[in-house]
Amino acid sequence: MYFLLKAKVSYLKTCQGKGSYNKFLINNKLLIVSELTGRPWKNQNSIWKKRFITATEKILEIENSQKLELIKASQVKLKRKVDLQSVKIFDRPTSQQGRQIFMVPLKRNDAVIMNMLFTSIS
């Protein structure tokens, strides 16, 4: 049983998603025949189909989770890069940031209100 599991896993890894159950049977015919326990082939065939499909799903699940981890790591790396750039921009003195970008022109009424606020604070 162990050898068949090992054969199944190695076959699925080598075919990289392009293999088939029938090719697996052909490639591992002798091993499968040696594992038959006297049950009719029809029963064995359905058992092996289920095992093959289950193993394929597990391998795909592992591969997908690994790809997902790589994507998450890339996202974290990109976010850190953006955060570092943001820190560099906001740590500069105001004169280097460009007053035109950060200073919004005030209307006359807004200027009066701002003047009143600053005079009342000081």
Image: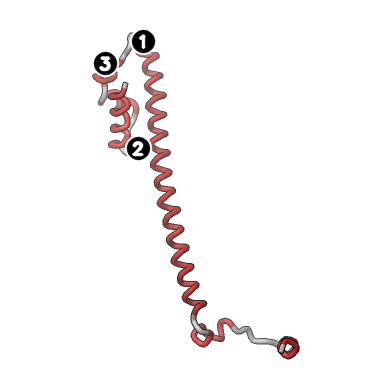
- Which quarter of the image is occupied by the C terminus? bottom right
Q: Quadrant of residue 22?
A: top left
- Give the distance between the C-alpha atoms of the residues marked 3 and 2, in whole angstroms: 26 Å
Left or right: where does residue 40 sit relative to residue 79? left
Tag 1's secondary structure? loop
Residue at the left extreme?
30
> Relative to residue 63, is residue 86 depicted above or below?
below
Tag 3's secondary structure? helix
Given residues 42 and 55, the one toward you in this image is 55
Q: Residues within 10 Å of mark 1 (few under 14, many from 20)?
A: few
Image point 34% across, 27% down: which residue?
21
Q: Which mark is residue 17?
A: 2
Q: Position of residue 5 (x, y in %)?
A: 32, 26
Q: Badge 3 is on which residue? A: 34
Q: Position of residue 42 (x, y in %)?
A: 38, 14
Q: Badge 1 is on which residue? A: 40
Image point 49% across, 73% down: which residue?
87
Q: What amino acid type is highlighted by mark number 1?
A: Pro
Q: What amino acid type is highlighted by mark number 2?
A: Gly
Q: Quadrant of residue 59?
A: top left
Q: What amino acid type is highlighted by mark number 3?
A: Ser
Mark 3 touching mark 2, by CB under 8 A? no
Given residues 57 and 23, the one toward you in this image is 57
- Which quarter of the image is occupied by the N terminus? top left
